[in-house]
Structure formats: C-alpha cells, structure tokens
C-alpha cells in the first residue's frame, strides 16, 4: 500500500533535520529529495543513506513551488506526499490518510492536525472569509472535514489531480503557493480535507542550519509580502490588491518608524524586508530585489 506513494522533500541547506527524517520514514516508500542547490556530495550522501531515495539537484535556489513541481513530475506513483524537512509523520498516520483519500474519488488533497515541538495542538487549517463551507460545524466535528486550505508542510495528494490543476504556480518563491494550488483544485470540483484526531509533528523553522536562520527569516519576510500581493492580484484583481497593499504599507511604515526610534535593529530589518516585498510585488517585479541566502 505504502509503495503507491512517493514522498517529496524540498531542501535548501536543510541537513539539520533531513537525515533524522529519512531514518524515520517507512522503508517501503519511495522518496525524492529536491535540493535547491548543486551540492553533489549532499546528493551522494542522501542516496547512500536510504534505500528507495533519489536526490534531484536544481543547480540553484528555485523556490519551494518550482522544486516541488520537479519532484511531482519525477514521481512514478499515483500518489505523492509533500513533506517539509521539519515535519515528522508516522507510518500509522500515513496509512490512515491513504485509506481515506483512496476511497474518496473527490478528495484531491488530505492532511491532518499538527502538533508543535512541545506536543501542543497547532492550528494548521483555515476557511476563507466568504467560504461556502460550514465553518462552525467543522470547528467541533471529529474525523474528516472539508477546508479551504491548510499549511502545506505535510499533505497527501493524487498526482493526476495536481497535474490537472497545473501544479504549483512557479511565480511564487516561498509562501502562498499551496493556498493558490488548493484554490485551483477546488475550482475543478475536488475536495481539500483534514482528518481530525490524528497528528503529525511540525517543528517550525528548524530545517535550516543555525548560521542561516537570520538570513532565512529576512528572506521569508520579503517573500511572504511578495506572495501575498501576487496572490491577491492573481485571484481578486489589481484594485483589491492595491487597496490591500496601501493598508499593509502604511501599517509597516508605522512599525518601521517605531522600531527605528526604539533602536530595535532586528525588528527594523524584518519590517524593512516586508516593505520591499510589498513594493516589488505591486509593481510586478521579482528580480529587482531578492535576499540572498
């Protein structure tokens, strides 16, 4: 059963958790590691470390969505599991998710609830503001529920439906790509689901080397803002995106001035990068400024 699934793990200097994760994955499952670099020794180490594991080198940091698309296209199985290097899922949970998605023809993507490093429940699924789903009922319902989107650190999907939806939009570099993908999937009449009552562990922000954490954080701020504006432009139009941009720009400008006055250098840089991302996205550029990490 599990040999029908290929696990896809996108990495970028994610050695810290990757080998720990690979060691815990069921041995019968295929794994494709897509490394956003040209580290040949890393590739050799990964493929030697675990049977049924291949490592694809992109040559450069292409971003999360584009790298996942490479993994999906190279998968030989009907099902793929997107898994972050800092997300840990047990064999029993994978089997339960597979059993559910395999039986339900309209379910395209499924995940479950999340616990953090302290084993506390961490909210990972959401409903759009004008969602047609029954949010109040789903809030207390156990078992399978329909949602509009969830954080894409771990999910199981039918490959043919991902292909039908056009895979991840490769204009995104980091953030909002899974929300955009789920929107496309739902527009084709398929379901996005969460199985409540079972869990995987997501140790957020722990996949990169410690020496890269600060630069990764700044990069994340920039790309989050860029992706947010791009998402609104793409799905709601330029007028809505412009209004949202003005709101966020003013909020961030006030915060920037406050942190400058208070001498909070780290916070100042984070907000500064957010503003840069907003400005680049609203004018439609992406290469004008991208943090190097």
Image: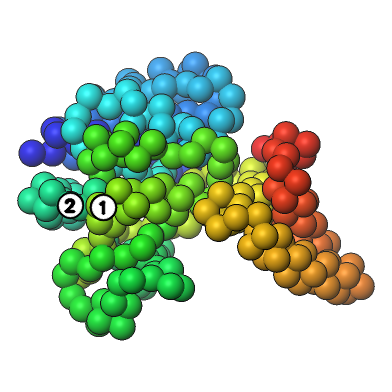
For label 1, the crowd category at 10 Å Cα-Cα, with few meaning under 14, some 14 to 19 and many 20 or more, is few
Of marks 2 and 1, the one in the foreground: 1
Q: Nearer the viewer, residue 235 or 149?
A: 235
Q: x, y percentage for residue 134?
A: 29, 77
Q: x, y percentage for residue 12?
A: 53, 35
Q: x, y percentage for residue 150?
A: 38, 60
Where the C terminus falls, by quadrant? top right
In the visual, does 198 lie left or right of 13?
A: left
Q: Quadrant of residue 123?
A: bottom left
Residue 79 seen by the camera: yes
Q: Nearer the viewer, residue 44 or 274?
A: 274
The residue at 60%/55% (across/down) is 237
Q: Where does label 2 land, which residue?
A: 106
- Asked if residue 136 is positioned above or below residue 4 in the image, the reply reads below
In the visual, does 269 lie left or right of 189?
A: right
The residue at 31%/65% (across/down) is 147
Precedes in sequence: disc 2 or disc 1: 2
- Cβ–Cβ under 8 Å for marks 2 and 1: yes
Q: CA distance from mark 2 to mark 1?
A: 8 Å
Q: Where does label 1 land, which residue?
A: 189
In the visual, does 244 lie left or right of 46?
A: right
- Asked if residue 208 is positioned above or below residue 125 in the image, the reply reads above
Residue 286, numbered circle? none
- Asked if residue 277 is positioned above or below residue 240 in the image, the reply reads above
For label 2, the crowd category at 10 Å Cα-Cα, with few meaning under 14, some 14 to 19 and many 20 or more, is some
The residue at 44%/54% (across/down) is 179
Q: Nearer the viewer, residue 43 or 108?
A: 108
């Amino acid at each position: 059963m599990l040999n029908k699934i290929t696990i896809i793990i996108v990495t970028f200097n994610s050695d810290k958790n990757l080998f720990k994760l690979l060691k815990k994955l069921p041995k019968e499952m295929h794994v494709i590691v897509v490394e956003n670099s040209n580290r040949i020794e890393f590739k050799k180490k990964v493929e030697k470390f675990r049977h049924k594991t291949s490592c694809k080198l992109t040559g450069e940091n292409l971003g999360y969505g584009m790298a996942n698309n490479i993994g999906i296209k190279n998968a030989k199985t009907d099902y793929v599991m997107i898994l972050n290097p800092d997300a840990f899922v047990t064999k029993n949970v994978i089997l339960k998710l597979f059993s559910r998605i395999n039986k339900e023809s309209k379910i395209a993507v499924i995940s479950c609830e999340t616990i953090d490093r302290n084993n506390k429940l961490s909210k990972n699924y959401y409903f759009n503001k004008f969602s047609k789903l029954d949010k109040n009922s789903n809030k207390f319902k156990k078992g399978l529920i329909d949602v509009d989107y969830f954080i894409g650190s771990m999910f199981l999907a039918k490959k043919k439906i991902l292909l039908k939806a056009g895979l991840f939009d490769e204009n995104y570099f980091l953030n909002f790509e899974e929300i955009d993908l789920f929107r496309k999937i739902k527009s084709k009449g398929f379901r996005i689901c969460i199985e409540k009552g079972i869990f995987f562990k997501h140790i957020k922000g722990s996949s990169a080397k410690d020496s890269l954490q600060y630069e990764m954080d700044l990069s994340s701020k920039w790309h989050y803002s860029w992706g947010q504006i791009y998402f609104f432009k793409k799905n709601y139009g330029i007028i809505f995106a412009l209004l949202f941009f003005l709101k966020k720009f003013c909020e961030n400008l006030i915060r920037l001035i406050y942190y400058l006055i208070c001498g909070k250098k780290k916070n100042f840089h984070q907000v500064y990068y957010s503003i840069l991302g907003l400005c680049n996205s609203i004018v439609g550029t992406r290469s004008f400024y991208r943090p190097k990490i």
